[in-house]
Image (cartoon, rainbow, N blue to C red):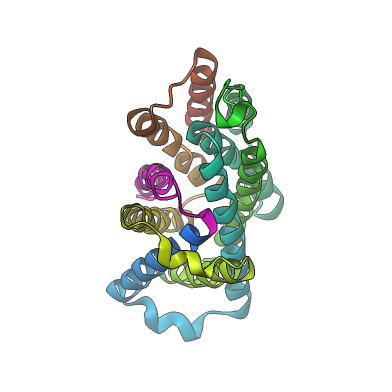
Amino acid sequence: MWMLLAFGSAVFAGLTAILAKCGIRTTDSTVATAVRTIIVLAFSWVMVFITGSQGQIAGIEPVPLLFLILSGLSTGASWLCYFKALQVGDINKVVAVDKSSVVLTILLAWIFLGEGVTLPRAIGALLIGAGTFLMLEKKPGGAAGGRKKSWLFYAAGSAVFASLTSILGKAGITGVESNLGTAIRTGVVLVMAWAMVFITGKAREVSRIPQKELGFIALSGVCTGASWLCYYRALQEGPASVVAPIDKLSILVTAAFSYIVFHEKLTKKSGAGLAAIVWGTLIMLAG
């Protein structure tokens, strides 16, 4: 069951990137992140009450609660970097860098969670790293080809914080119902995102979001909520070093829809990179 949930997380995560890109054509990425987090938080708490886990709040131990908060802070940082990268970069390249976080996740899971690194996982990690490098080829006239290079910095930051999120999230949901854990961490993300909006002086831009873009932002929030609920339920029942790679298969969904919606075509080199990432992920599942 945890493997099916991990695949569900991948599908919703892939749709999230496409919908979010549609919602930040003119809207500031930080403002969009704060708005969509409201949707995710509402979605998360609805699931808490549906599952009846709200009564467990008082019983959460201090240490798991601390890890949930830290995981929320890492998630907030990852989101802010990710959606900024999406706004200024090509979606396929941004997602490829973000998905490379699985390599760091495996390393951190080995160091802090004691999850073994088998030969298939090591080979898979190398393929993912190589595939990411291939997908970073320069594209003349594109966002990655000289017009704006800051996307790589933000995408790399997103990957690092995403890795920390997986490890801290795994530690934080020990003994905590997964839906409740997701709702608590989302609350932390909400506070962090809106704090960034006010700190950067962008509060007035909230009322200026075009209605169409607001709709896409809201839909991306719903997909994120669904992805999270699947992902952290899978983390609770399965190993982080396997759940994380499955979740990264969302790049296939993103690649398909980026071609349909944004007409972003993969060259032979970037196509080979995508294939390497997918094969690396599948090899990991065998380990």
Query: Bounds of the magenta span?
Result: 1-30
Check residue 14 for magenta coloring.
yes
Residue drawn at point x = 51 percent, y = 39 percent: 245
Q: Secondary structure of the magenta portion, mostly?
A: helix
Residue 174 showing in the rendered view: no
Residue drawn at point x = 53 percent, y = 28 percent: 277
Q: Is residue 1 above or below residue 91?
A: below
Q: Position of residue 193 (x, y in %)?
A: 55, 66
Q: Is residue 268 left or right of residue 252?
A: right
Q: Position of residue 196 (x, y in %)?
A: 60, 66
Q: Position of residue 45 (x, y in %)?
A: 37, 73
Check residue 114 for magenta coloring.
no
Q: Nearest the camera: 48 or 193?
A: 193
Residue reaching furthest to the bottom: 58
Quarter of the C terminus within the rendering: top right
Q: Nearest the camera: 55 or 153?
A: 153
Residue 29 showing in the rendered view: yes
Quadrant of residue 146 within the rendered picture: top right
Residue reaching furthest to the right: 111
Q: Is residue 98 left or right of residue 250?
A: right
